[in-house]
């Protein structure tokens, strides 16, 4: 009998009643008792491990409802800028990476706030890499930084038109400056050598190790592409087959937004064939990612009202819709009819409305419900659309870490939204009060995959690294910590259609031990908590260096 006992702490079960306990027993990968010492006593004699929580918190393993782990793993194995903050730090790191490698300079993770207007210049890169091709996406992967040599080899010049779904940043004379937004990145990406399957496999392994260290036991990969050739989809299949996939994963297959109306049925059939490859095991591809718009910082998020200029005047620019309202309805109705869950990227309020309208159309056409369709990001939601989430059973998939004042928000977003829209960004509280199902994710590598950092912001609406005195961003939209914890566990598990997320008898023993109990500590210290242990199906997959609480 493979048994583990946890006792002498606080157990947050994440059930509907937000029940608390003090002890849990696990046997053969399943939870067999929840309560106090009396409830677990009969399993103690045969336990191979007894963990004394010493007042710490035991909770269900976190589930990241929107992440790009293989992409994040690739960045960690390449020129990783995600932990740096300034232009000088970026250039030093890029120069060192270039000196140690040959070929393309790939990786990314730079912050828009490190550069004037959020747009780095090619000549900065030219100082450290003048003669090699460079493609470095920023943290949100909606823009990329390239050097002059890369612009030349890609044929991007003053006469190159912006693609329909993107923009080339230019100087006053129309010459490209070195930053490419959205679909304009494809002009360079087509030159990049394709990743090998070995690279994808290594990236998945690194991502899984890192996510387990943060208490993440499962996730929904928000952009899974398949072959021909090497692919993220194949990496998951291989890891599942060879037993190295310890996490529980739902893959959101990528919807090709260039698909014409008469090709929708064929694309749905192709995606269904990929879904059929994943029947059983720890990887399921029963979801499709539909990307409706971009991001506010580059004025590509789709808005009902136009962006403002530096003087507060309307620009007439409403952002980009990668699928118009009619296309979205047709695509979502077809996917819903085929049994797929739809995972929307919907950041601006027009994109959110288009997504909700598409779900309403699918329900009317197919008579379906309960698919757990969900909308990720939700930076702006029109007040009229808040109640529609509950009415349609649509899950609000929240990236809570973004709901705080920081340079990118204060310098590149708020001035161009105006006071009224800025005040209702990331309306978590309003969605909760309206009865919307809530889930949480990180969008890693766009931002850290640390759930505790995101939970800190969800509760405080202040970044845990913010300077003293930083005000909250929309304090009225904050969530209570138990609600936020439930969203990042049972809510995200439901959104990812995973059988986990709750500590209850009969459920998988996917568990996390924190180094403290943030439920009883000051809200301002939530982000200081760390993961001491992570278990998947009762197996220890991460232990902190100083964790020695076995008895």
Image (cartoon, rainbow, N blue to C red):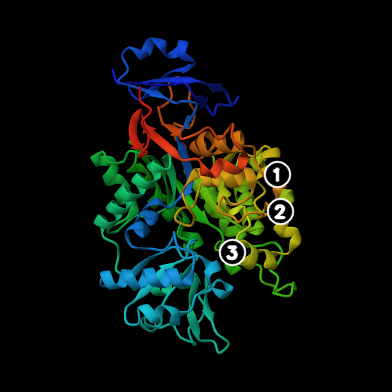
Answer above or below: position of 479 versus 202: above
Question: Which residue extends farthest bottom?
Answer: 173
Q: Earlier in the sequence, mark 1 or mark 2?
A: 2
Contact, CB < 8 Å: mark 1 with mark 2? yes
Q: For the N terminus, which image quadrant? A: top left
Q: Earlier in the sequence, mark 1 or mark 3?
A: 3
Judged by depth in the image, the label closer to the viewer, 3 or 2, is: 3
Judged by depth in the image, the label closer to the viewer, 1 or 3, is: 3
Name the spot of residue 510 as percent of width and height, x first. Answer: 41, 31
Name the spot of residue 366 as percent of width and height, x first. Answer: 56, 42
Quadrant position of residue 14: top right
Query: Disc 1 versus disc 2: distance between alpha carbons?
Result: 9 Å
Residue 174 seen in this snapshot: yes
- Alpha-carbon neighbours of circle 3 within 10 Å: few (<14), some, or many (≥20)? some
Contact, CB < 8 Å: mark 1 with mark 3? no
> Mark 1 falls on what kind of element?
helix
Query: Disc 1 versus disc 3: distance between alpha carbons?
Result: 24 Å
Residue 396 seen in this snapshot: no
Query: Disc 3 versus disc 2: distance between alpha carbons?
Result: 17 Å
User: How many discs mark residues in the rendered view?
Assistant: 3
Q: State the mark number for residue 408.
A: 3
Residue at 55% of width from left, 23% of height from top? 20
Contact, CB < 8 Å: mark 3 with mark 2? no
> Mark 2 falls on what kind of element?
loop
Residue at mark 1: 430
> Mark 3 falls on what kind of element?
helix
Residue at 36% of width from left, 78% of height from top? 128
Q: Earlier in the sequence, mark 3 or mark 2?
A: 3
Left of 197 or right of it: where is 494?
A: right
Q: State the mark number for residue 424.
A: 2
């Amino acid at each position: 009998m493979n048994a583990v006992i946890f006792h002498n702490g606080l157990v947050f079960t994440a059930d509907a009643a937000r029940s608390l306990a003090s002890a849990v027993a696990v046997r053969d990968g399943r939870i067999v008792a929840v309560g106090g010492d009396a409830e677990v006593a009969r399993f103690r004699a045969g336990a191979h491990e007894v963990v004394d929580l010493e007042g710490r918190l035991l909770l269900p393993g976190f589930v990241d409802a929107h992440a790009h782990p293989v992409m994040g793993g690739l960045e960690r194995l390449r020129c990783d800028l995600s932990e740096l903050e300034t232009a000088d730090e970026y250039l030093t790191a890029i120069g060192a990476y270039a000196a140690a490698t040959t070929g393309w300079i790939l990786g990314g993770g730079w912050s828009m706030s490190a550069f004037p207007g959020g747009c780095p210049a090619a000549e900065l890169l030219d100082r450290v890499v003048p003669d090699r091709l460079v493609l470095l996406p920023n943290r949100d992967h909606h823009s990329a930084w390239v050097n002059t040599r890369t612009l030349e080899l890609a044929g991007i010049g003053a006469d190159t038109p912006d693609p329909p779904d993107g923009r080339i940043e230019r100087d006053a004379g129309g010459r490209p400056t070195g930053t490419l937004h959205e679909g304009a990145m494809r002009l360079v990406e087509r030159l990049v050598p394709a990743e090998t399957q070995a690279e994808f496999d290594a990236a998945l392994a690194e991502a899984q190790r890192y996510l387990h260290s943060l208490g993440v036991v499962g996730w929904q990969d928000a952009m899974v592409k398949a072959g021909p050739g090497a692919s993220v989809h194949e990496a998951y299949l291989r890891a599942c087959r060879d037993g190295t996939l310890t996490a529980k994963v739902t893959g959101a297959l990528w919807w090709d937004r260039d698909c014409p109306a008469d090709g929708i049925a064929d694309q749905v059939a192709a995606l269904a064939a990929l879904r059929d490859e994943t029947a059983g095991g720890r990887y399921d591809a029963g979801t499709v990612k539909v990307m409706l718009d971009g991001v506010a910082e580059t004025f590509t998020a789709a808005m009902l009202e136009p962006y403002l200029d530096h003087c507060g005047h309307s620009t007439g620019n409403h952002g980009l819709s990668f699928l118009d309202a009619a296309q979205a309805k047709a695509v979502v109705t077809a996917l819903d009819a085929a049994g797929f869950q739809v995972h929307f990227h919907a950041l601006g309020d027009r994109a959110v409305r288009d997504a909700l309208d598409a779900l309403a159309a699918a329900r009317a056409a197919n008579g379906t419900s309960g698919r757990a369709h969900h909308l990720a990001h939700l930076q702006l939601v029109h007040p009229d659309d808040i109640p529609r989430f509950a009415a349609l059973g649509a899950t609000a998939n929240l990236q809570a870490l973004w709901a705080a004042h920081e340079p990118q928000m204060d310098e590149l977003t708020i001035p161009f939204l105006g006071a009224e829209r800025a005040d209702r960004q990331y309306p978590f509280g309003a969605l909760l009060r309206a009865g919307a199902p809530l889930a949480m994710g990180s969008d890693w590598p766009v931002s850290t995959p640390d759930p505790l950092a995101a939970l800190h912001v969800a509760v405080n609406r202040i970044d845990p690294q913010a300077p003293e005195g930083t005000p909250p961003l929309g304090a009225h939209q904050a969530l209570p910590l138990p609600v936020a914890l439930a969203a990042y566990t049972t809510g995200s598990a439901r959104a990812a259609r995973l059988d986990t997320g709750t500590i209850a008898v009969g459920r998988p023993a996917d568990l996390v031990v924190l180094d403290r109990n943030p439920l009883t500590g000051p809200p301002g210290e939530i982000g200081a908590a760390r993961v001491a242990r992570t278990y998947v199906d009762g197996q220890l997959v991460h232990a902190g260096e100083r964790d020695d609480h076995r008895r």
